[in-house]
Amino acid sequence: MKKLMMIAAMMVAAVSANAQFEPGTWSIQPKIGGTISKVSNMPNFHFGKIGNTNLDIDKSVYTGALIGAEFEYQVAQPFSVAAGLNFSMQGCKWGDFEYKNGDKSVKAKDLKMELNYLNIPIVANFYLFKGFAIKTGVQFGFLLSAKEKGTTVIKDGDRSAETKESLDIKDDCKKFDIAIPIGISYQVPTIPIYIDGRYNLGLTKINKDGDTNYKNQVFQLTVGYKFAL
């Protein structure tokens, strides 16, 4: 039993040593997490076509998932550079609304715009102390899909009908996006588990037409495991 405990302790020590990633070493970090996003300058209602402002409906944030991996090169003890590849679910949402006309009522709910991107972040990490880094860089995004979705419920007396709608708006959106990631990360001291939080500020507009520039604004939080290469 004591031998097994000694072996386990040696394995933990070895992992901790590898987790320090000395200058000149490479590492890879698979990661998974979530996104909280919105689209700047988006009108309070926009369903069917970018820029439609027929109704005044409150906006809310869109929550999605993120999965990917990042390669990191430790240039010096306090500095590294990293490049990644992430699938990111982004977009925006609106609140529910309802209006009535005599005995008939129409309710729209679950209104949202879903934007799925393949993002390539390139960041510089500055380690303020062991395991804790601040980071910034540039991120290139490639639009995979863009849809507007919602559910309409029509009530007429005792009768009710619910319809789910999904509109493909990819042709209305630009296929390429540039953002500036700003964030922090922390590596657990004993094991190479990495916690990373970033805010991605969109620089390019996502809409093809119109004078208003709609831009992505995304906060992401991920957890990854760092392996030495």
Image: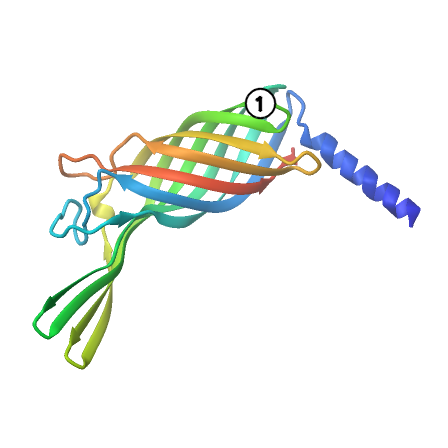
Q: Is residue 182 left or right of residue 211?
A: right
Q: Quadrant of the C terminus?
A: top right
Q: Is residue 173 left or right of residue 35?
A: left
Circle 1 residues within 10 Å: few <14, some 14–19, many ≥20: some
Q: Is residue 159 left or right of residue 115?
A: left
Q: Position of residue 18 (x, y in %)?
A: 71, 31
Image height check: is 129 above or below 105?
above
Image height check: is 95 above or below 20?
below
The amino acid sitting under disc 1 is: Tyr
Q: Position of residue 175 (x, y in %)?
A: 28, 40
Q: Position of residue 180 (x, y in %)?
A: 38, 28
Q: How many marks?
A: 1
Residue under label 1, please give it. Answer: 127
Tell me what residue is drawn at x 47 percent, y 30 percent: 183
- Most extreme residue toward the right is 2
Q: Is residue 80 left or right of residue 108?
A: right
Tell me what residue is drawn at x 17 percent, y 54 percent: 48
Residue 10 occupies quadrant = top right
- Most extreme residue toward the bottom is 158
Q: Secondary structure at mark 1?
A: strand
Residues 183 and 158: in front is 158
Tell me what residue is drawn at x 23 percent, y 71 percent: 162
Tell me what residue is drawn at x 18 percent, y 80 percent: 159
Q: Position of residue 228 (x, y in %)?
A: 66, 33
